[in-house]
Image (cartoon, coloured by chain):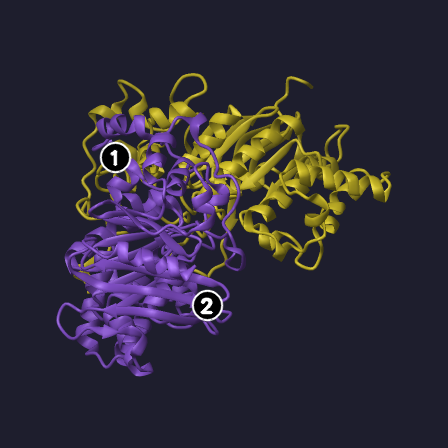
Amino acid sequence: MADEPVLRLEDIEVHFENRAGLLDFGAEDQTVRAVDGVSFDLEERDVISLVGESGCGKTTLGKTAIGLQRPTGGSIKFRGHDIWDVRDGESDADITWDEIRTSLQIIHQDPGSSLNPNRKIEAILRVPINQTNPELSPGEKRERIYALLERVGMTPAPDFADRYPHQLSGGEKQRVALSRALLMNPDVILADEAISALDVSLRVEMMDLMLELQDEFNTSYIFISHDLSNARYFTAHGGGNIGVMYLGELAEFGEAERMIGDPSHPYTKVLRWATPDLSLRDSGDLPMRKIDIPDPINPPSGCRFHTRCPEAREVCEEQRPEDFGEGDHQVACFRAEDGHEYWDSPELSDADADDLLGADDSLQAD
Amino acid sequence: MSADGLDGLEVARGSDVTDPIIEIRDASVTYDDGDSYVLDHVTMDIERDEIIGVIGESGSGKSMLASALLDAIPDPGYLSGGIRYRPSNGEEVEVLDLSKEELKALRWEEISMVFQGAMSSFNPTMKIGGHFEETLKAHDADVDEGMQRGRELLSDLYLEPGRVLNSYPHELSGGMQQRALIALSLVLEPEMLVMDEPTAALDLLMQRSILRLLEELQTKYDLTMLFITHDLPLVASLADRMAIMYAFQPIEIGPTRSLVEDAAHPYTRALLNATPNLDAPLEEMRPIEGSQPAPVNVPEGCAYHPRCSLATEECRVEEPAHFRVDDDHRSACYHWEQSREEIALNYIDDLGDAARSGGEN
């Protein structure tokens, strides 16, 4: 079993049925395609970062990966066992659903709302210990809580343990949330925008802490962020991969520094453009034809990015690009393949190519 | 500490700006009769038609500064000092002397404000168009003419006026709502737009897109913009000048380029080095040790001294005035020259590279 990855996602598909009447776009098919055909492996002590704009499906994919969301297609294997077969009792594996759930933990963007405001930090942290080590004496449990609080930099620990969540700063709350997840001895932690709510100056510190604990606790991370520079920092230090998501699909997947230094997919280049830097150079106009992301109900045909892509040609409207690229670096774009018919395809004639209007009936209509 | 602030004021007067639209003089906000300040004797000018970024971490007083401009401090806070508004045509106004009615007119018609989280600024049961009409009527403006302006503003922000005006807030994405709110804030043709973390709840791509659009709006409508954020790199591409807030005061003010390329305050330099940045070598990003002081226990002397590697006896005792680094650049640090020598900026070697590879990406 040792050679199995901690998590293996194969062709994951998550579709939501949308109740009629909620959105009146007159569309006949009301299926939201949140995730479509995503596969990757997460190894021991690995990091995979998922980046993309709001609505690209990165959170849904993350939650699916740790068993909080049931996929409508594909499979998730935890150390070789299909987790939903285990859940349904259809697996002969020697692992239980509870063990899987314990091994896959999450920390959220807003630690304030994930900590019970009426309980002290010590009580909050005692819950996971009661579950994983019920045999410990109260004194031993307390010792463990103090040791961990000290480890995450909250000293003096007895003082912090005696506080309520509202008496902590945002960064301290996030450390408590991280501690709580770690006390479950998880194999994987999903960090869903876990540092986005922190001040810019605290983000590096929090990421460093998470990475130090990765070694000590032997955990892997799935790190979700809309900020490429944070994803780069975390992923490169954790020795992992970045997956760029667009409308439920992986647009590009590969090693962090290469992705930043030499992005292949036009959408990755857009995210690179959107990432602020201090060079003060004129970064030029938005390298996209439209500002707003299309509706994930009935996503665009062919390559889903073609409605906004500055490089789109007619073939992009018709064909869905497979993953191109060699080895660990994958790009779902025809441009990554020399000699593809894309290069002979005429440029997309686009009525509103010159402006960035989000939709079809434009100004003249009113 | 106020006495030292006043000394600073003398040093600070001068050629920072030539045609101020706002003059802030010794503005303070206290919630406990002066025992502690959440805005601590601030003196600065805002130049007409500039985009100024006010940057600070949580609890640095940056939002207080914005509220002070419109005399909109939440109760029971007490605002003292002077806020002088100089419209492009018309009489100068002392904001703190205005009556309730006059304040109402000043807000929206002269200086308008946009906050983070458009969802809480809109009435969820009213269509976007209703908000425009209501705002126009409340200020006795011509509704037809105003709606025409509103449509144009919406298309300036790459929204379809017809569809957006006819939508309820929840029918729009977060990015669309925030853009609609910016359009609404400009419908009465204010001279100045104050934005408090206007893009913080949005993803980075939408933030950058909105910043790009703000730049276009600024040029088209000759607006003065004050942009408050904790995210220094985000506004660096937008702002003409930046003011860095620490412990309820601006501690460094200067043109964006000279501030980013050679900041003259140890805190600013630490802040720049702590920022995840695609151009900086990975191993050189490091957090700032310690945390910002709370209003009730701001250290004596320079508020940054407990965290500062350059701190001397002087810093512990006497609050530094603003020193003039350059004609248009000032820093509240005794050791500003030394800070430039001793605290290296980790991204500086890459600026050349970045500039070369930039442009068309």
Question: In the figure, A212 relative to B89: above or below?
Answer: above
Compared across the picture, whether A321 is left or right of A358 comes to: right
The residue under the point 44% across, 45% down is B315
> Mark 1 to mark 2: distance in Å?
57 Å
Same-chain status of marks 1 and 2: no
Query: Residue A35 placed where, x, y %?
Result: 48, 40
Q: Pointer 2 indicates a residue of which chain? A: B
- Residue B276 percent location from the top left of the image: 42, 36
Reading the image, the residue beneath label 1 is: A312
Give the residue type that dot 2 points to. Thr
Q: Is residue B148 left or right of residue A326?
A: left
Mark 1, other Cα within 10 Å: few <14 / some 14–19 / many ≥20: many
Identify the image quadrant of the C terminus of chain A.
bottom left
**Badge 1 sits on which subunit?**
A
Looking at the image, do the residues carrying marks 1 and 2 touch, with CB atoms under 8 Å apart?
Answer: no
**Label 2: which secondary element:** strand
Name which residue lies at 67% across and 56% down: A164
Q: Tell me the residue at 83%/39% (across/down).
A: A140
Up the image or down, A22 lies above or below A40; here it is below
Q: Of B347 and A17, which appears nearest the observer? A: B347
Q: Colour of chain A?
A: yellow
Tell whether A358 sits left or right of A114: left
Name the residue rendered at 74%, 43% in the picture. A128
Return the residue nearer the eye: B21 or A36.
B21
- Residue A209 in picture, x, y percent from top left: 57, 34
From the image, tell me which residue sits under label 2. Answer: B30
| Amino acid type assigned to the residue bearing label 1 in the image | Ala
- Give whichever of B335, A42 is nearer the camera: B335
